Image (spheres, rainbow, N blue to C red):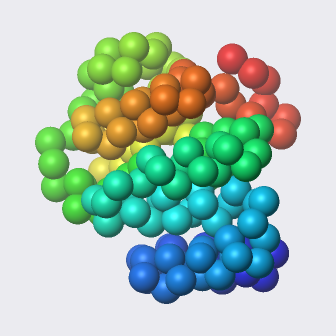
Amino acid sequence: MAHRSLANVLFRLARYEDVEQACRAMAEQWPEDPYSLILLANVRYKQAKEYVQFLDMAFGKDREAASAMLVELFDFTLPHAQGELGLSPSEAARAVKLSEEVLRSLAEDGIAPHHVENGQLVFVARELAAWQTTLSRYGLFPPVQRRPGRPSQ
């Protein structure tokens, strides 16, 4: 848990090279745990590098755990995408073929990538496309909310 916590703090601080190093060390220490591979994939996504190969490896180790981590922990927001033209919730919902209510709920639960600007939910097309494409690759789109106490959709 301490290794995961440190890696998460480094990730939030955008110290991606340090996160990569921590993930590689975790993967050596706990080779069957997909967590480090999911986090490494997320770092590579943030760096605009190829990341799917690491997700494939994580799914090869433990599909159920990797599925939950990809849906609930992978951060598809891109810091440099905030200046891009934003989509309203209704436009974004049409783009990913979900109801606006479902998309809003997924955003509020931290599952759908979004930004908050002037108190309003804003979606970026590039982030939504990566989210939908990546989750679809593993049969996870549309995502089911899995948080404890949440009803499945």
Is 75 positioned to the left or the right of 22 in the image? left
**Residue at the image position 30 percent from the left and 51 percent from the top:** 117
Q: Quadrant of the N terminus?
A: bottom right
Residue occupying the far right of the picture: 149
**Residue at the image position 43 percent from the left and 77 percent from the top:** 16
Q: Is residue 125 visible from the viewing direction of this image?
A: yes
Quadrant in which residue 23 is drawn: bottom right
Where does residue 135 sit, x and y in percent of width and height?
A: 51, 33
Quadrant in which residue 129 is drawn: top left
Q: Nearer the viewer, residue 11 or 45?
A: 45
Is 116 positioned to the left or the right of 107 in the image? left
**Residue at the image position 49 percent from the left and 58 percent from the top:** 41
Where does residue 152 sit, x and y in percent of width and height?
A: 75, 21
* Location of residue 106 with respect to 18 vertically, above or below: above
Where does residue 105 sit, x and y in percent of width and height?
A: 56, 30
Where does residue 17 sit, x and y in percent of width and height?
A: 42, 82
Q: Nearer the viewer, residue 56 or 115?
A: 56
Is 119 positioned to the left or the right of 19 in the image? left
